[in-house]
Image: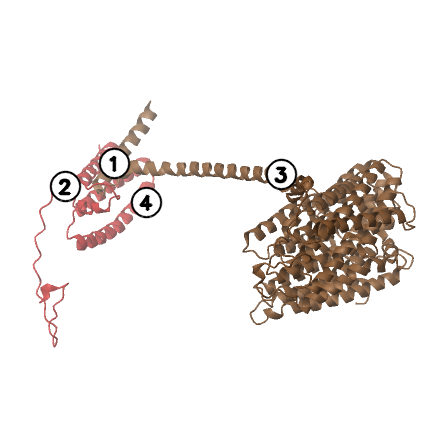
Amino acid sequence: MIGLWHYLAVAAALFGIGLVGFLTRRNLITMFLCAEMMLQGVAINLVAFSRYHGNLHGQVFTLFVVAVAACEAGLALALFLMLYRRGKSLDASDWQGLREVGVSQTLDTEPLAPAPAEEALPTLTPAGARPARTEEEPARV
Amino acid sequence: MSDPVGLALTVLALLLAATVVTACFNTSLLRKIAHWPLIVACGSAAVVALVLLLKVHDAAGDAAVRFVSEPVTWFQAGKLAVNFTLTVDPLSCVMLAMITFVATWIAIFSGSYMHGDRGFARYFAVMGLFVFSMCGLVLANNFFLLIAFWEGVGVCSYLLVGFYYDKPSAAAAARKAFLVTRLGDTGLILGLFFLWRLTGYATTDLTTSFDLIARAVRDNPAKVEELTAACLLLFCGAVGKSAQFPLYVWLPDAMEGPTPVSALIHAATMVTAGVYLVARCAPLYAMAPEAQAVVAWAGGITAILAAFFALAQNDLKRVLAYSTVSQLGYMFMALGTMGSVSPTFAVTAAMFHLFTHAFFKALLFLAAGSVMHAMGGVIDMRRFGGLRHVMPRTHLTFLCGAAALAGLPLLSGFWSKDMILEALTEASEHPGPHSGTFYTLLLVGLATAAMTAFYTFRAYFLTFWGARRIPEEAGHHAHESPAAMTVPLVVLAFGALFIGAAVEPLSGHALSHFLGRTPSLELASAAPGVHAAEAAHGFDWALAGISSALAIGGVLLAWWLYGGGGPEAVPDALAPVWVASRNKLYVDEIYHGAFVKPAETLAFISRQFDGFLDALARLISYVPRAVGLGLRPIQNGLVQFYALSMALGLAVLLSFVVFRISR
């Protein structure tokens, strides 16, 4: 028969995998997914204990956790999008410039391969005007 | 408004209005005429005060007379209820008339003397405030009101001594004057609380509390000691304000102020506030013989010491300042005889001298101001001389003032000084524990009289006789002062010559009789143990002869030594005395060593200690900084590193909790 211990074991496994993934990966989205995994491990714990105690407290709490996690996801993905636009990369270690002043940089022994250059999209010249050559958008010409 | 209290209020209102109006005159357009409000207000106040004097005189007749205004509550705190009440009696009337009269002429003089000064309007505004406070002081019928006005005149004195505030010596002198008088004021405030206690915490009104205290002491003679303590504390205030030994040191320095200020505040009015206070509190002093002895001794020591200092000063104004200190000592000597002669006589003698002194000392200061004006601000007698042809009117008026101060026969100073000496003689003849004291003080008084005559005429001869010498600061325009300055001189000179004779011998002792109608003096005469013989005084020809001879002797000695004008030559035999006098017996240096230096050392130590505390506080502020320095490398900007530290920390915490619980 499946008892409380089984649930707890699954939850611990989920939490452990998530933790290891969070500590080892450096892609922001993967890290985020790992964090979600840890959160779900905790949620399983709550549900299991809820069942074990025979009341609904843990389940209600889990509903809240899931709702908060959803909000979190929205926020986090929006942030990642902004970070990607700034740095053209999802590498979390690219942001170590945010460290304390006077602390030396941590050298990356295994740098990622540079991202392939984006192919310039074709643009149309606005009708009736001479195409302007601007510094921000040299690709338009 | 025609009742006496209404008239007294009118005087105060006029002066306060003048102050406020003058303060508004400090604009470039109106500054030139800023002296007019004060002159007009003082002049009309003098007329009102004279009317008041006549009214009170008529009302007095042969009975004591006093008008007290309706009490208006000023403030109330617990048992303490302070009323705003004024009292009009012969004593305050005489003071009021004298103050407003002298102030009027000094205001007129100042209008010309201060002409073109940057602070012209400020000068007259403060002057108005001063005259207002001084009038309030003599009219106040409540201890707290008295203190308020007492401090008011102190503040005005501070502001006017430090009038040239950009001059460091003037600023220092103002500070010194304020701090030294503050020492005395502390005693005054304590004394007033003592008196409040003696009334059984019933009232702080002067007239009522005198009655209550007199009754309390009569019922319980053991309270005399408490009363003596209160009187001595009150006298502390008088010592500070009236520049008596040992707190006289501020007055000579106060000469840094403009000369008319010295004339009004530091000769005629404010410095006599102490004398007035003791005279006003005569019923208390009459019951405390020990306090009387202290007052008399302080007066005697001050009189002879200051006269000695005045002998060899170079600065004309300082000679006059020490002379003021000495004459105030005279007044206190007279007040000290209060129990041994009838209090009325003692107070009358002191007030009479105060009255005449106001005239001739104001005159002397104004004449010195006139000299200073012509000499381009130089007041050192070594640098000018022989001015009698350059400034004939100033010369003649100064001579009148000097003769009156020296006590030459038939002039004002002669009559009042003689009355004080008479009081001392009578006190020394009165059998009692202090008769020896008063005999000594009589000799002190006579010696002081001789010295006064000598130093006054030394200053006179050095300034006006001998070869004509004019300092280069005067330029080519050393000339007689304008009429606005000489007219007040002439008016005051008439006062100096004749006012003494006019109010006493020629008018059948009008002043004595009038002051005798003061209720508080009658109360003083009724005090137990007071020699209450009626003040029927024949003129003491022998005493008058001795004092005249001493005065004339002093003048002749001065003429013999300095008749040829300066520079002064000192006989070798007298050189040590001369040096001691010139250096004021090193009292200033002793005070500097005994009080100023220790205070400065204490301040220095405190400052160092403060620095030490600051350093300690700074040291503590370094602790978080050092901790931050140790923790900073952790913030390396790697998210994984943060997560790892968090996980490890959590693991450590959890294992700690788990193992602790399981153990």
Disc 1 from disc 2: Cα separation: 19 Å
Residue B645 is tagged as: 1
Labelled pair 3, 1 in contact (Cβ < 8 Å): no
- SS category of the residue bearing label 2: loop
Are the residues under badges 1 and 2 in a single subunit?
A: no
Q: CA distance from mark 3 to mark 1?
A: 74 Å
Q: CA distance from mark 4 to mark 3?
A: 90 Å
The answer to whether the residues at label 4 and label 3 have Cβ atoms under 8 Å apart is: no
Mark 3 — on which chain does it sit? B
Residue type, label 3: Ile
Chain appearing in red on the rendered image: A
User: Where, quadrant-wise, is the N terminus of chain B in this rendering?
Assistant: bottom right
At 82% from the left and 53% from the top, the residue drawn is: B414
Colour scheme shown:
by chain
Q: Amino acid at mark 1?
A: Ser
The residue carrying mark 4 is: A60
Q: Which mark is residue B590?
A: 3
User: Of the residues tagged 4 and 3, which is closer to the observer?
Assistant: 3
Which mark, by number, is residue A108? Answer: 2
Q: Residues within 10 Å of mark 4 (few under 14, many from 20)?
A: few
Is residue B244 something that shows in the picture?
Answer: no
Residue B309 is situated, as x and y percent measured from the top left of the image, at 68, 45
To the question of a shared chain for discs 3 and 1, the answer is: yes
* Cα–Cα span, label 3 and label 2: 81 Å
Q: Residues within 10 Å of mark 2 (few under 14, many from 20)?
A: few
Q: Nearer the viewer, mark 4 or mark 1?
A: 1
**For residue B12, what is the image quadrant?**
bottom right
Chain B: give its colour: brown
Q: Chain of mark 4?
A: A
- Earlier in the chain: of badge 3 and badge 1, it is 3
Question: Quick one: label 3, few (<14), some, or many (20+) residues within 10 Å?
Answer: few
